[in-house]
Image (spheres, helix red, strand yellow):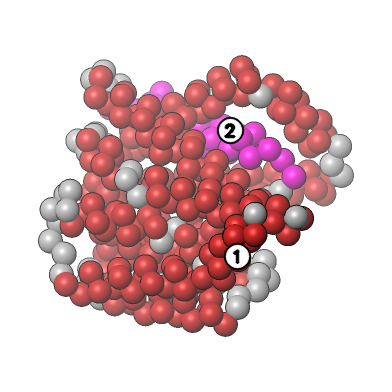
């Protein structure tokens, strides 16, 4: 029974890790709705709006949890406090950089460059987790990553500009996941609101001295609220929650769901020209995802049959 409970619990974390990139895969649609606005404005208002919604939620429904985490931080020894502060600031800078470069790439480079970023991200995450966190990889998982690497190389043969933007976006988010894996012991929503608060310290002065007029169009604010809640708070919380129960590498590999959806949208919804080789490459990546998680799927299926 205990083994079954562990499997159900692991399945829950795997589902959260899958759902986050699945949601993010559709983000290019609302971002394109407001593409005429500067990328920095979209980012700034996204952060401020998400922060306002999160603080409202915490103050209304999570005050006890917030007080518990504040006391927990006060009880930490000095060196742990410094470490936690450093990790929080680093995570904030990384997620800020990831958001800005992603929005700019979607609106001014190409949807496919943004998709390539999240193809590169799992490889960077896996490498960082292996060397920094000493997370183990089974031979089959190493093979899956090698297959995915070959596919990414195939896709990266195009524009060097796309590749450089993709690498920047990917590196920011890969190391954000690593930092989140190290930073444990606190409620994930509280951590998220603190990270967004630090991002806001950079954003609010820019908004005050911004040379752009504050948008007044309902389409802008409706889209910003949608992006802040559905494409920021929910998937970020899910990815942070997933890291409680599964490795950074597994979470990172499931990010491949994002570019597969983004690629599909680029080819169908946005009608971007796509050479046949890219269809082959994305198909190979999909197989690599299944191969990497095959043992997880088998274990969940085996234990579910016993319930």
Camera-near label (1 vs 2) is 1
Callout 2: 10 Å neighbours few (<14), some, many (20+)?
some
Secondary element at tag 2: helix
Q: Residue shown at 54%/35% (left/top)?
A: 196
Q: Quadrant of the N terminus?
A: bottom right
**CA distance for labels 1 and 2:** 38 Å
Residue 298 occupies quadrant: bottom right
Between 166 and 208, the residue placed more toward the observer is 166
Q: Residue 215, position in %: x, y? A: 27, 22
Q: Mark 1 or mark 2, which has the lower sequence index?
A: 2
- For residue 6, say whether it is visible: no
Pointer 1 with pointer 2, Cβ within 8 A: no
Magenta region, residue range:
185-212
Which dot marks residue 85?
none
Q: Which residue is mark 1?
A: 302
Q: Is residue 195 magenta-colored?
A: yes
Q: Residue 48, position in %: x, y? A: 45, 28
Q: Which residue is mark 2?
A: 193
Dominant secondary structure, magenta: helix
Reply above or below: 29 against 25.
Answer: above
Q: Is residue 253 magenta-colored?
A: no
Residue 218 occupies quadrant: top left
């Amino acid at each position: 029974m205990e083994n079954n409970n562990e499997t159900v619990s692991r399945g829950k974390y795997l589902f959260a890790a899958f759902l986050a990139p699945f949601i993010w895969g559709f983000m290019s649609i609302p971002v394109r709705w407001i593409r005429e606005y500067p990328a920095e404005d979209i980012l700034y208002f996204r952060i401020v709006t998400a922060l306002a919604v999160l603080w409202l939620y915490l103050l209304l429904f999570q005050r006890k949890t917030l007080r518990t985490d504040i006391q927990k931080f006060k009880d930490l020894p000095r060196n742990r406090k410094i470490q936690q502060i450093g990790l929080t600031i680093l995570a904030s800078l990384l997620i800020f950089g990831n958001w800005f470069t992603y929005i700019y790439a979607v609106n001014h480079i190409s949807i496919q460059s943004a998709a390539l970023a999240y193809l590169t991200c799992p490889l960077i995450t896996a490498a960082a987790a292996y060397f920094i966190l000493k997370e183990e990889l089974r031979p089959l998982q190493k093979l899956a990553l090698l297959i995915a690497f070959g596919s990414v190389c195939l896709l990266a043969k195009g524009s060097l500009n796309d590749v450089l933007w993709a690498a920047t976006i990917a590196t920011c988010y890969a190391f954000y996941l690593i930092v989140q894996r190290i930073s444990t012991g606190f409620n994930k929503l509280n951590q998220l609101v603190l990270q967004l608060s630090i991002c806001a310290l950079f954003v609010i002065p820019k908004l005050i001295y911004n040379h752009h007029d504050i948008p007044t169009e309902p389409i802008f604010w409706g889209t910003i609220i949608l992006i802040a809640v559905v494409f920021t708070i929910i998937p970020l919380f899910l990815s942070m929650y997933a890291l409680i129960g599964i490795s950074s590498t597994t979470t990172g590999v499931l990010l491949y769901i994002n570019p597969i959806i983004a690629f599909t949208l680029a080819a169908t919804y946005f009608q971007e020209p796509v050479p046949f080789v890219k269809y082959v490459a994305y198909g190979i990546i999909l197989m690599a995802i299944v191969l990497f998680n095959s043992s997880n799927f088998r274990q969940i299926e085996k234990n579910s049959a016993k319930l």
